[in-house]
Amino acid sequence: MLHSMPLKLKCCCDTSTKSPLLMLPLLFYQTMAEPRTSSIDGKLAEEFAVPAHVEEVREKMAAFACRHAEAGRRVVLITSGGTKVPLESRTVRFLDNFSSGRRGASSAEYFIDSGYAVIFLHRHRSLYPYTRMFLTINMLDALQFRGGEGAGEVVVNQQVLPGIAGVLKRYNQVKDGGLLLPIEFNTLSEYLHLLKAAAQALSAIGSKAMFYLAAAVSDFYIPASEMPEHKIQSSNGPLQLSMKMVPKLLSPLVKDWAPQAFVTSFKLETDSAILLDRARQALAAYRHQAVVANVLDSRRGYVVVVTPDTQAELVLTEDEAEKDVEIEERIVSNLTSAHSKFISQQAGSLSISVPSSSSDSESSRAITSSWEAVRRV
Amino acid sequence: MLHSMPLKLKCCCDTSTKSPLLMLPLLFYQTMAEPRTSSIDGKLAEEFAVPAHVEEVREKMAAFACRHAEAGRRVVLITSGGTKVPLESRTVRFLDNFSSGRRGASSAEYFIDSGYAVIFLHRHRSLYPYTRMFLTINMLDALQFRGGEGAGEVVVNQQVLPGIAGVLKRYNQVKDGGLLLPIEFNTLSEYLHLLKAAAQALSAIGSKAMFYLAAAVSDFYIPASEMPEHKIQSSNGPLQLSMKMVPKLLSPLVKDWAPQAFVTSFKLETDSAILLDRARQALAAYRHQAVVANVLDSRRGYVVVVTPDTQAELVLTEDEAEKDVEIEERIVSNLTSAHSKFISQQAGSLSISVPSSSSDSESSRAITSSWEAVRRV
């Protein structure tokens, strides 16, 4: 497959890797990262409406990832917000998952502070990075009219929004630096197809890609073929819904679509008694790198980052919580360290032993999954 | 029941009514408006969690209504946004109804422009009056930092938000005038209890109250007693949901809770073929004053206001839509005219023939339901 290298190099090369010895595995990743057809691909195409702009978005994400990888940056794909699961094709009613998008938005800021470029795949109108300060106020209550010639000026009252000047400067730096690529989804179908496109786009940068799958994705859906066209009539009596299981994209993502990437999923439960078991089951089933386990009521102050070999509790003290320290800062710090080790271990193991075919991707993954215990915060 | 009059006068009197002759029916309304117990009250209390603050909110709404009625203003209760129907008591998943809250928010502004005071019972984070301009932009893209001594200033770029100065002035006038009382709900249960509280609060001002029930309320729910406590596990396989019918509050609202008020409900369908029939069925079943019938795809440009005797089509031309004319302006104009006629007809009929007991409320409603055809726009 080495004949395809020059083509790959045209769209994306890793300039941070200077040694010809180290170039080989990286180029190999790019070739190997071509998606394989799996049964989930067929199911996705059949049962979940493909968004019209998916190809365009894939190209945009791939260009973003390559540009930043060439500049020596790692790239994280953050998913954020809940998914909308329509009950009718002309949708009035839908199933949703609780999520304000706060964790994803806040984490995006900390990843950028840590030197990452961020693809922010988020639910339409969920919380956006750098806008948390607007969450609990009506913007009009923070504005003041200042008369004068003409229409006059409208000025932000910095007593109502004390941090606004600093946040605005940082937002503009990030925008000017092109460090944040926002992509929106609304329905579950859009989410699934865009996640697949993102994974394929990011596969080109190998282990420099991180997936931070914080979106609250529905486990259940009604296939398009079984969905009524029109609004369900309440005059027909009580509602019986029969919903199918949403295919778990984590499996093809880890195995086929972006096999060199560092993948973190999230597990939210309401029952803490089953949480760590569920997190470990997910790691065993999907063989990815980390699960951030959290309980609904305490999610802002306590999470456990679970890896195949370790678990790290991240806790905010009451004092820290009062000072608006955010647990996302700890999560991102933990995962970026782990990602660094992952990258150097992958590079080390692969410069010695280059797999001879793409089916070996799992064995290289097995080697790198033994990264040492993340330190407790 | 006349012995109760002085007590009623303490909390709310109608100062716009100068004639002693006309005082009688108005005071009579206040006595008659005491809620009667119905089977729905029992069901509400049993199957839908009562919000802790409902009494406090009821008092706030009653004080608001009385204050404005005393100042000669009519009061409209607008409901807006979709309802969240939990599938678990520690809620991760929920059923929702499509609604941005745009119609409610926009209508609130037109009602205030028409001299009404507005109780805005809206879904948490649905669109708020005077904030439509922020809907499609990130506020940070509309702000500019202006350096100088100290922290510097943050100013709104009026090229990005051209109307901001005017909107801000109007918003502050409305706030200073206390013309808008915002009340939030999130779940279906909160909505139902707060609507009942609002109806009871508004009953004291009789026919001066209008209900404008634009919220997209779920027809289905899972009773608290049948709801799992914890997050439904996807490992248990496909999801079978059995949802009960939500009781129709329109019935006790019209009959018992606020029998003198002018009540408008909304009917949204995706299938235009059944829409007008459904609207007429609702009028026949609940015996209220008007239904605003609209189809999902065309709701921004075309509605039909259906009354027992008339139907008025309200349409925006393409030219009007391009100039950002809003159909809510037409809807509110239509309904405020109808409300005026309703009030004078009620006053006229009741000053001649005062019902002798509260059970006559329906006969007085029958008289007033024959208000003449609303004009077509």
Image (tube, coloured by chain):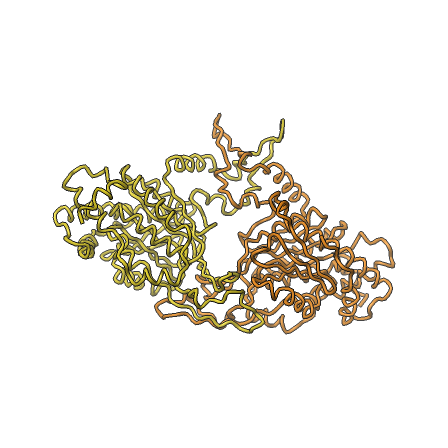
Chain colours: A yellow, B orange
Q: Position of residue B344 (x, y in %)?
A: 81, 57
Query: Which of the 4 quarters of the picture holds residue B54?
Result: bottom right
Quadrant, the N terminus of chain B: bottom right
Depth check: B148 or A234 in front? A234
**Left or right: where B305 falls relative to A377:** right
> Is residue B296 something one can see in this rendering?
yes
Q: Position of residue A287 (x, y in %)?
A: 25, 58
Q: How many marks?
A: 0
* Residue pictured at 78% horizontal, 61% vertical: B371
Taking the view exactly as shown, the residue that stands out farthest to the left is A352
Depth check: B101 or A67 in front? A67
> Is residue A344 something one can see in this rendering?
no
Q: Position of residue B271 (x, y in %)?
A: 57, 63
**Left or right: where B103 falls relative to A53:** right
Depth check: B120 or A304 in front? B120
In the figure, B54 relative to A129: above or below? Answer: below
Query: Which of the 4 quarters of the picture holds residue B48?
Result: bottom right
Q: Position of residue B60 (x, y in %)?
A: 65, 55
